[in-house]
Image (cartoon, rainbow, N blue to C red):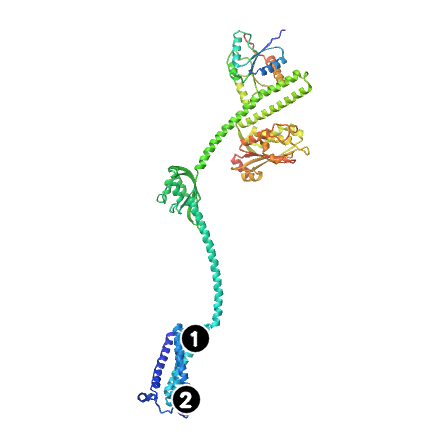
């Protein structure tokens, strides 16, 4: 379509060029004779020149000639300007319109030129031809313009352009803002990445523990500076499976098997072994733990792990074991000393008591009343000391006698205890309620001693204001439950059997709770309550020997709660009780 | 009827205990001949002398303390009970021990009874009265050949 256009335009151009050339010749030759003669057949005619129509009136003739000449000149100048314009604006659409328009104007110029020419000559055929050419070109231009109207309309005028430009400006401001925000976010993320990278670097290179990285098959490819520093292996030595050479030879097969298993199952890896230490020139005890690192899709991307040097811990364990042995021996000695001391102290004490009696019996009549009173005080003190020695002996016995741990039914154990305490219970008119009691693992005679003491105390330290009520309950708790419930910090597995003895007696200030479990500790004067202050110390020692804990809570004036916390040994039983 | 006087040997290094015991025994009966020896070796010598007729007759009862210098109660008990001539003499162990294990061991060695040393004069009186009534009055002890 476009090519056809250009053909038409070209044809019109050729016609105009020919016509223009001929006209120029005529204009140049003016009134000359030779050329005019040659072209006379084309240019001359029998027609009367146009000047005749003006009756050769000079004014009228020059008016037309002048006007047509000026118009022609002006018309010829326009295509030149348009040529400059299209040379600058290389737009196809504009170029074709402008060329057509230029031709049209140019031809218009020629028609006016021939109008001047025809004032003196009657070459109406020629001027008619030029007019026809002009008509053809103008029609083409008109049609072309109509067709091109939509395109022309879309070309913005300066005011429209300004508006568009300002809109564009706003939009671009938004874009700049968005870009600024994006950049800021990128900056933050880059910072985070950098920080996390630094941390990683720090972890892998500067910490004392060894960090290792392997590919998804469990082989090492990356450099591991901490491994290098610890084992002395070079990258070439430890890469792939070379790292196994740094493991204690007798452990290598088992470790490699376990490692491959974990890699295959994508399970966390843990192994305790010995690793060669370059620094100590020996295999040192270590524990290593590793985890698969997954990407966003959940695929294992690599394995990352760390190695902890257990040397210090192992040394501490050995030291602790030896300290513990020494302590045990010391304890044994102390217990023996306690036993012997309480035994040997008894000898002179017996003399004081017996000779006190002798003095009283043989000479009471000769002595003043005051002296007899002094003898009484002396004897009573000696009696108390005798009681203390008994308790001391009991305390040392509790520690030295071998425990016979067996499964005990708490119901029957407490019934036995209550039978022994029957007199005291009846005298105090005490109500003792037993909750749902289960079995515990303990030494029968020692645990009996504990409850004899606890229930005896609950009756002894009763409140004068209310009838004695004692509640004995049983619970089985996990370590966490126990720590939470009883405000203790027990570690270890559990479960625990907790037997609580709750009374409504006089209670005591809770700040003495730990104090009263010590040997010879008393909260009350002898005149108020009898006792050596060894009862709870013995209970505490018994529970401790069972790897348990005696916990005391009390509210002064309201009552006390004693909890005997014992480890549950029988696993099957604990399952049954949970079911 | 002339009463047969009971012949008792107390073996104890603690003279005060001996005094208290003697006093108690004398309080129970005035019919005792009490000899005091301070260790096991002295007892074995004394028994040997009496067995060979050098002095008196064998005792009716031995009260033996455990903790003594030179020869302790356990060793002495073993020696007495392993000698056929002295085996039938009742030996009552005197001690302040309350350890059942110690007590059991002593019975194993042939002790006839065990007496915890009393804390009071009254205790001594009670103990000696019991000794008198059971070991010296009620029980039919074999007569020793002199």
Answer with the quarter of the image where residue A525 lies: top right
Q: Please state the horizontal and vertical placement of residue A162, each as a whole percent of the image.
A: 48, 70
Residue drawn at (62%, 8%) of the image: B3
Q: Would you place residue B65 above or below residue A410 in this image?
A: above
Q: Quadrant of the N terminus of chain A?
A: bottom left
Q: Earlier in the sequence, mark 2 or mark 1?
A: 2
> Is A70 covered by the magenta stretch?
no
Q: Residues within 10 Å of mark 2 (few under 14, many from 20)?
A: some
Q: Quadrant of the C terminus of chain A?
A: top right
Q: Would you place residue A126 above or below residue B129 in this image?
A: below
Q: Chain of mark 2?
A: A
Q: Nearer the viewer, residue B4 or A533?
A: A533
Secondary structure of residue under mark 2: helix
Q: Would you place residue A267 above or below residue B50 in this image?
A: below
| Label 2 and label 1 in one chain | yes
Marks 2 and 1 in Cβ contact (< 8 Å): no
**Is residue A209 shown left or right of residue A459?**
left
Q: Nearer the viewer, residue A480 or A128?
A: A128
Q: Chain of mark 1?
A: A
Q: Please state the horizontal and vertical placement of residue A58, each as a whole percent of the image.
A: 41, 91
- Specify the label residue A148 is tagged with: 1
Q: Please state the horizontal and vertical placement of residue A137, each as a whole percent of the image.
A: 39, 80
Q: Which residue is mark 2?
A: A62
Q: Nearer the viewer, residue A340 or A542?
A: A340
Magenta stretch secondary structure, dominant: helix
Q: Would you place residue A14 above or below residue A294 in this image?
A: below
Residue stretch in magenta: A56-65
**Is residue A566 shown left or right of residue A153?**
right
Secondary structure of residue under mark 1: helix
Q: Residues within 10 Å of mark 1 (few under 14, many from 20)?
A: some
């Amino acid at each position: 379509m476009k090519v056809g256009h250009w053909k038409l335009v070209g044809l019109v151009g050729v016609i105009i060029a020919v016509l223009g050339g001929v006209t120029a010749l005529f204009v140049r030759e003016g009134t000359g004779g030779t050329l005019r003669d040659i072209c006379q057949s084309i240019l001359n005619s029998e027609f009367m020149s146009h000047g005749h129509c003006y009756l050769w009136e000079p004014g009228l003739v020059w008016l037309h000639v002048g006007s047509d000449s000026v118009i022609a000149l002006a018309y010829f100048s326009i295509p030149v300007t348009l040529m400059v314009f299209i040379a600058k604006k290389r737009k196809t659409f504009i170029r074709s319109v402008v060329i057509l328009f230029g031709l049209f104007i140019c031809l218009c110029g020629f028609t006016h030129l021939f109008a001047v020419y025809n004032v003196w000559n009657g070459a109406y055929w020629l001027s008619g031809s030029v007019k026809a050419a002009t008509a053809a070109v103008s029609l083409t231009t008109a049609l072309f313009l109509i067709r091109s109207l939509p395109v022309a309309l879309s070309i913005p005028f300066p005011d429209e352009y300004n508006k568009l430009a300002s809109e564009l400006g706003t939009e671009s401001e938004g874009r700049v803002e968005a870009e600024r925000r994006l950049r800021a976010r990128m900056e933050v993320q880059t910072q985070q990445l950098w920080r996390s990278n630094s941390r990683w670097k720090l972890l892998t290179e500067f910490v004392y523990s060894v960090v290792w990285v392997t590919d998804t098959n469990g082989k090492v490819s990356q450099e591991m500076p901490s491994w290098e520093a610890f084992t002395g292996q070079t990258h070439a030595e430890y890469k792939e499976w070379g790292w196994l050479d740094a493991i204690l030879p007798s452990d290598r097969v088992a470790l490699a098997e376990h490692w491959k298993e974990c890699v295959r199952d994508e399970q966390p890896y843990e192994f305790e072994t010995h690793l060669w230490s370059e620094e100590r020139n020996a295999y040192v005890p270590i524990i290593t733990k590793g985890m698969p690192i997954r990407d966003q899709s959940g695929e294992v991307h690599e394995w990352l792990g760390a190695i902890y040097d257990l040397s210090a811990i192992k040394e501490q364990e050995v030291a602790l074991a030896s300290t513990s042995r020494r302590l045990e021996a010391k304890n044994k000695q102390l217990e023996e000393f306690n036993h012997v001391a309480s035994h040997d102290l008894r000898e002179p004490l017996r003399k004081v008591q017996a000779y006190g009696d002798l003095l009283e019996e043989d000479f009471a009549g000769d002595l003043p009343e005051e002296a007899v009173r002094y003898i009484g005080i002396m004897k009573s003190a000696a009696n108390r000391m005798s009681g203390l020695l008994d308790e001391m002996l009991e305390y040392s016995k509790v520690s030295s006698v071998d425990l016979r741990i067996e499964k005990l039914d708490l119901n029957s154990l407490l019934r036995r205890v209550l039978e022994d305490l029957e007199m005291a219970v009846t005298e105090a008119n005490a109500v003792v309620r037993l909750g749902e009691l289960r079995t515990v693992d303990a030494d029968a005679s020692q645990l009996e001693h504990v409850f004899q003491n606890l229930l005896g105390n609950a009756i002894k330290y009763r409140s004068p204001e209310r009838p004695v009520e004692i509640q004995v309950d049983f619970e089985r708790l996990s370590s966490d439950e126990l720590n939470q419930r009883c405000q203790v910090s027990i570690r270890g597995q559990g479960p625990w059997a907790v037997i609580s003895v709750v009374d409504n007696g006089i209670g005591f200030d809770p700040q003495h709770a730990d104090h009263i479990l010590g040997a010879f500790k008393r909260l009350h004067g002898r005149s108020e309550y009898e006792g050596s202050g060894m009862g709870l110390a013995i209970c505490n020692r018994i529970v401790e020997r069972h790897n348990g804990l005696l916990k005391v809570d009390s509210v002064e004036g309201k009552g006390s709660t004693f909890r005997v916390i014992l480890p549950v040994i029988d696993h099957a039983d604990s399952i049954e009780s949970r079911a | 009827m002339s009463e047969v006087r009971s012949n008792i040997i107390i073996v104890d290094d603690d003279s005060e205990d001996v005094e208290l015991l003697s006093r108690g025994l004398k309080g129970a009966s005035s019919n005792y001949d009490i000899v005091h020896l301070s260790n096991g070796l002295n007892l074995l010598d004394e028994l040997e002398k009496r067995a060979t007729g050098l002095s008196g007759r064998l005792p009716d009862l031995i009260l033996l303390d455990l903790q003594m210098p030179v020869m302790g109660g356990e060793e002495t008990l073993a020696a007495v009970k392993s000698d056929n001539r002295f085996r039938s003499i009742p030996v009552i162990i005197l001690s302040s021990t309350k350890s059942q294990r110690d007590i059991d061991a002593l019975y194993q060695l042939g002790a006839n009874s065990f007496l915890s040393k009393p804390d009071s004069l009254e205790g001594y009186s009670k103990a000696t009265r019991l000794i008198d009534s059971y070991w010296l009055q009620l029980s039919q002890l074999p007569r020793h050949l002199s």
